Amino acid sequence: MEKRDKTQTNLVDVSEMASILRVPKSWIYQRTRQGQSAIPHVKLGIYVRFDPEEVIKFFRLNGS
């Protein structure tokens, strides 16, 4: 994996996040609507973006 500068963030969209986690896009959308237990995401207007490292860390710390 490529080493990143701490100020650089590679955000991915719903399709890419679903592919990384090997789950349906609908599952990703559902997990962004769960309030405090939602997966880490950034809303940019109507768009949703994810930092894959943060999402994976979230699941490692919180389980499913």
Image (spheres, rainbow, N blue to C red):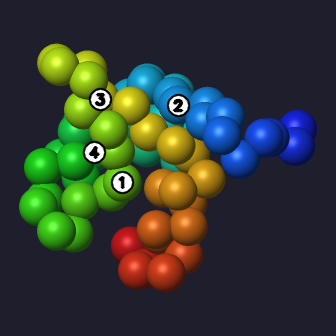
Of labels 2 and 4, the one closer to you: 2
Mark 3 or 4, which is nearer the eye? Answer: 3
| Quadrant location of the C terminus in the rendered image | bottom left
> Residue pushed farthest front?
7
Q: Is residue 14 above or below residue 61?
A: above
> Which numbered disc, 1 or 3, marks the residue that appears first in the sequence?
1
Q: Nearer the viewer, residue 59 or 4?
A: 4
Badge number at residue 56: none
Q: Which residue is mark 3?
A: 48
Could you tell whether 32 is left or right of 41 in the image?
left
Would residue 2 be found to the left or right of residue 44 on screen? right
Q: How far across and down, in percent of the image, does residue 7 sit?
A: 66, 40
How many numbered tags mark residues here?
Answer: 4
Give the residue pinned by disc 1.
40
Write the residue at 27% across / 45% down. Answer: 27
Residue underneath mark 2:
11
Image mark for residue 27: 4
Tell me whether circle 3 and circle 2 mark residues in contact (CB < 8 Å).
no
Identify the residue at image location x=43%, y=25%. 13
Badge 4 local density, few (<14 within 10 Å), some, or many (20+)?
few
Is 54 placed above or below 9 here? Answer: below
- The answer to whether 49 is drawn above or below residue 38 in the figure is above
**What is the x, y in percent for residue 26?**
24, 36
* Type of amino acid under label 2: Leu
Q: Amino acid at mark 4?
A: Trp
